Structure formats: structure tokens, C-alpha cells
Image (cartoon, helix red, strand yellow):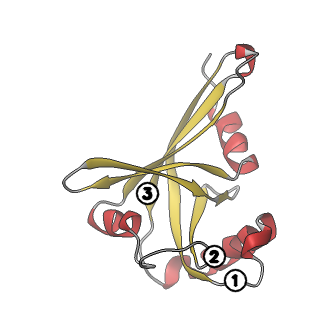
């Protein structure tokens, strides 16, 4: 059954990780697991943290977004024993780019990220990718 957009947005806000899909200019869809926070105004913040090892803090997802700001975030719930509990939500999102316009919102969402994930406390982010929900859809087994 289709989940209405308000319930989809609530599920997006109440969860903290999913699969971020950006568009690579040659390979096409570039999907990676990512943590995030979402606010009531339809913004999603995906951190580029300094906690996990990386070859560079300029990640492919950011390069992809610079070339094409369209992306998607997929979250889901799976229950092997009870398929009546299955659901998924897909948010079509658009990167807001670099710039001062989103800096205050990104800073507020960065604070929420550091509160949500103990690993991020006292560990600065290299950057925050700020994305706006364009459309959202979802499905539930019940």
C-alpha cells in the first residue's frame, strides 16, 4: 500500500541511515550507505565525517552532486519473520550546493548529527551535504 507523503516524511525524520544514490557521469547510479538527519522543513543533511578512514574528504558523492545535483535517499524496514512489517521510503532530493544560504541550516543539522551519533561528538565534520526533499514516496505491506 502506498504511504502518504506526510507519513513518508515522518519515517524519514525518525530514521538515521539509508542508501544515498547520486549520479556518476559515467557509471550512472552510485549508491552508498549513509547516515543522515532530516528536519521538518524537508532538508536532509549527510555528513562527511572525520571519524571513519577515507582516502580523501572530497568524496565521490560530492563530486557526483557537483556534476548533477539530483539524488535519492532510500530507507527501509525489513522483517524476515513478518512481512506485514515491510516498508520503504524513497526521497528524491536535490543538493543545495556550496554557499552561505544553507550554512545556518547545515550547522543546526550538524548539531543534530553529533547528538544522534555518539561517534560524532567532539569530532568535526569535514563538510555537510545539504539536500532538499523534492518528492517523497513510500510503500508499506500493511
Q: Circle 3 — which element?
A: strand
Q: Residue at x 45, y 82 (%)?
A: 99
Question: Is residue 142 among what the camera can see?
Answer: no
Query: Which residue is identified by label 2?
Result: 51
Mark 1 and mark 3 residues within 8 Å of each other at the beta carbon: no
**Picture coordinates of residue 36 (x, y %)?**
63, 59
Q: Which tag is nearer the camera, tag 2 or tag 1?
A: 2
Q: Position of residue 50 (x, y in %)?
A: 59, 79
Task: Please say if 117 is above or below 135.
Answer: below
Read off the residue under disc 3.
Answer: 94
Crowd band around label 1 with a 10 angstrom C-alpha radius: few (<14), some (14–19), many (20+) = few
Q: Residues within 10 Å of mark 2 (few under 14, many from 20)?
A: few
| For discs 1 and 3, the disc positioned in front in the rendered view | 1
Q: Is residue 27 visible?
A: yes
**19 to 3, vertically: above or below:** below
Label 1 sits on a secondary structure element that is loop
Label pair 2/1, CB-CB below 8 angstroms:
yes
Mark closer to the chain start, 1 or 3: 3
- Say which of marks 2 and 3 sits in front: 2
Quadrant in which the C terminus is drawn:
top right
What residue is pinned by disc 1?
Answer: 123
Q: Quadrant of the N terminus?
A: top right
Amino acid at each position: 500500500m502506498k504511504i502518504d507523503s506526510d507519513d513518508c516524511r515522518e519515517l524519514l525524520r525518525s530514521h538515521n541511515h539509508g542508501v544515498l544514490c547520486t549520479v556518476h557521469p559515467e557509471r550512472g547510479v552510485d549508491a552508498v550507505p549513509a547516515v543522515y538527519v532530516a528536519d521538518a522543513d524537508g532538508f536532509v543533511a549527510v555528513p562527511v565525517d572525520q571519524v571513519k578512514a577515507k582516502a580523501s574528504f572530497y568524496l565521490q558523492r560530492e563530486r557526483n552532486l557537483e556534476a548533477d545535483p539530483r539524488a535519492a535517499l532510500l530507507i527501509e524496514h525489513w522483517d524476515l519473520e513478518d512481512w506485514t512489517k515491510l516498508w520503504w521510503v524513497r526521497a528524491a532530493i536535490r543538493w543545495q550546493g556550496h554557499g552561505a544560504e544553507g550554512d545556518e541550516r547545515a550547522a543546526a543539522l550538524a548539531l543534530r548529527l553529533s547528538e544522534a551519533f555518539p561517534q560524532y561528538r567532539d569530532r568535526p565534520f569535514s563538510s555537510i551535504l545539504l539536500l532538499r526533499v523534492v518528492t517523497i514516496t513510500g510503500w508499506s505491506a500493511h
